[in-house]
Image: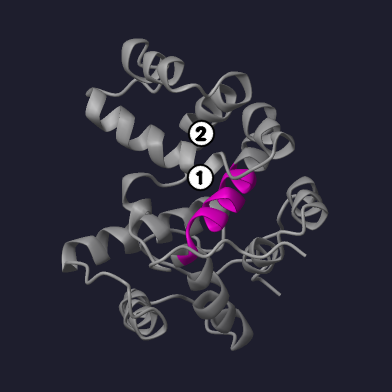
Amino acid sequence: MKTQRLDRPRYRSTITSASLRVTDSRIIAGLLLKDGRSQIWHKNIVEYNLLQMRSNRAALSVAQVLRARLRLLKPDLLEMVVTGTRELATHACFAAAIKHSLLLGDYLDLVLRDKYRLFIPALALSDWNHYIEDCRGRDPEMKIWTEKTVKRLRGIVHGMLAEMGYVDGARTLRLQSVHVVPEVLEYLEKEQEHYVLRCITVHP
């Protein structure tokens, strides 16, 4: 059985650099499938500016997060990101984001799941702050983030939930039904990605 990779500290703020960014993720996944060597990587991101960003620093920051996220996946799912429909690519990217960020995964598993179970119609902004406090209780090595970082993390995570359809928007946060595409579910089952599978199927 495959176990979820545990980093120390358990909760990190790496996702502040990039939300799902499906269009950019298609590019990064394509590079990973072709050639992930550092010199070629730098040339594609900086010299060729494949992500079409205004500064090299911003492009590298986003590219590094997306690469760290997507390189955890096997070629089967990377192909879904590159060539799949928008829905398939979005769900594949979200699976990668869960695997890369326990902060995201546990929010789904511990907070969103309870909302669905108790038939609570929407998330509240305060849910995120309470969740962060609980995270510190679970992970004594978790860094103390500034209020600005906590707010940015909340915006990124809620934006991801909106892209996936768990909520109707990052502001209204009304819960919706989500049916993850079969291809992603089959991949997660085949690869025994039990943690990711549990989190992504949080809707009953």
> Crowding near pointer 1: few (<14 within 10 Å), some, many (20+)?
many
Question: Which quadrant of the view contains residue 46?
Answer: top left
Closer to the camera in the image, 65 or 39: 39
Question: What quarter of the picture does the N terminus occupy?
Answer: bottom right
The answer to whether one can see residue 40 in this image is: yes
Residue labelled with disc 1: 69
Outermost bottom residue? 118
Question: What quarter of the picture does the C terminus occupy?
Answer: bottom right
Kind of residue at disc 2: Ser
State whether residue 41 is above or below residue 96: above
**Magenta run includes residue 196:** no
Question: Going by the image, does 174 lie left or right of 76?
Answer: left
Question: Residue 63: percent from the left, percent from the top?
Answer: 40, 32
Residue stretch in magenta: 90-102
State whether residue 15 is above or below residue 173: above
Q: Are marks 2 and 1 in contact (CB under 8 Å)?
A: yes
Question: Going by the image, does 56 lie left or right of 111?
Answer: left
Kind of residue at disc 1: Arg
In the image, what residue occupies the spot 33% across and 11% down? 47
Question: Which quadrant of the view contains residue 62?
Answer: top left
Question: Which quadrant of the view contains residue 145?
Answer: bottom left
Residue labelled with disc 2: 25
